[in-house]
Image (tube, grey):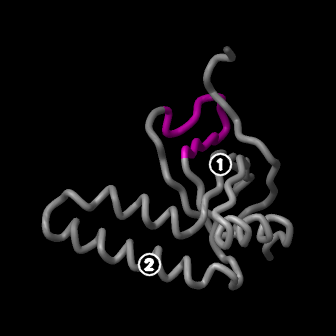
Amino acid sequence: MKDNVLESFVQAANKYEFTLDVSLNVNGAVVTGTMISAGEYFKTLSEEFAEGNEVAEKLAEQLSETGENAESNAGSEANFIHLKDTKIYNGDSKATPSKGKILWRGKLDEVDGFFLGKISSGTSK
C-alpha cells in the first residue's frame, strides 16, 4: 500500500518539476536524496548513454522517449519515486555508494516510511 502523502509529493514532482530532499525507509535500509520528476530521471539517465556505442545510443533514445511519456502522463497515479544525489544506508554509518551522483528509482508501495530532509555524510561547515 502506498503512502498518500508521499504519493502526493511524487505527483507534485512529476507535474510541476518540484524537488524535495527526502529520506525513505525501504526494507530496513535508509535511502536519502533529492526527489525529482520521472521526466528528469529518464532525461538524466539517457544522457549517461548518449555518447556511447550504437547499443548505448539506442538505449539513450529509448530512455529519452520514456521521459517524454512520463512528462505527458504527469497528472496520473504515481507508482515510482525518483531520487538524485542518492545515498543508501544499510545498517552502518557509511553510505553506499560513497561517491558520485547516483540516480535511484523505487516502487512507492515498497516504502515503509519517510522523513523530509536528506542525510549528509559529510563534515559540517
Instruction: Give the amino acid at mark 1.
Output: Val
| Left or right: 40 in relation to 54 | right
Residue located at (55% from left, 44% from top): 85
- Secondary structure of the residue carrying tag 2 is helix
Instruction: Report the predominant secondary structure element of the magenta stretch.
Output: loop
Q: Nearer the viewer, residue 90 or 78?
A: 78
Residue 81 at x, y percent in the picture: 64, 65
Residue 45 x, y percent position in the rendering: 40, 60
Q: Is residue 40 above or below residue 22?
A: below
Q: Is residue 43 magenta?
A: no
Image quadrant in which the C terminus is located: top right
**Residue in the image at 54% along x and 78% along y:** 70
The tag earlier along the polypeptide, 1 or 2, is: 1
Query: Which residue is tagged 2?
Result: 66
Q: Which mark is residue 31?
A: 1
Residue under the image location 80 percent in, 47 percent down: 116
What secondary structure is found at the residue carrying circle 1?
Answer: strand
Question: Which residues lie in the magenta part?
Answer: 85-98
